[in-house]
Amino acid sequence: MSAPVTVDMKRRHPLQRLEAPGRGLSGATHVVGLISFYRSFKLYGKHLERILSSRR
């Protein structure tokens, strides 16, 4: 499925200290971030009236 990795793509940036994480770990991290983002806005929407009324 994925294209072969060339030698140029394997080289790391001089400031990169760690190896890139595997695709599974990277995907799991993104899913956790998306769930957190969704829950933050869900909480905001749930308490929007209280937030807006406290500004008055």
Image (tube, rainbow, N blue to C red):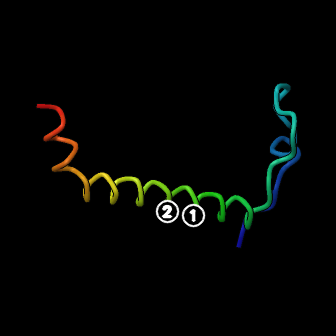
The answer to whether residue 4 is left or right of residue 29 is right
State the image coordinates of residue 34 (x, y, percent, origin top left): 50, 59
Based on the displayed image, in which of its 4 quarters is residue 43 positioned? Answer: bottom left
The answer to whether residue 6 is left or right of residue 56 is right
State the image coordinates of residue 47 (x, y, percent, origin top left): 25, 53
Q: Are marks 2 and 1 in contact (CB under 8 Å)?
A: yes
Dot 2 alpha-carbon crowd within 10 angstroms: few under 14, some 14 to 19, many 20 or more:
few
Distance between mark 2 and mark 1 Cα atoms: 6 Å
From the viewer's side, name the closer residue of 10 and 29: 29
Dot 1 alpha-carbon crowd within 10 angstroms: few under 14, some 14 to 19, many 20 or more:
few
x 26%, y 59%: residue: 46
Residue 43, numbered label: none
Residue 35, numbered label: 2
Q: Which residue is mark 1?
A: 31
Mark 2 or mark 1, whichever is nearer to me: 2
- Mark 2 lies on a secondary structure that is helix
Based on the displayed image, in which of its 4 quarters is residue 15 positioned? Answer: top right
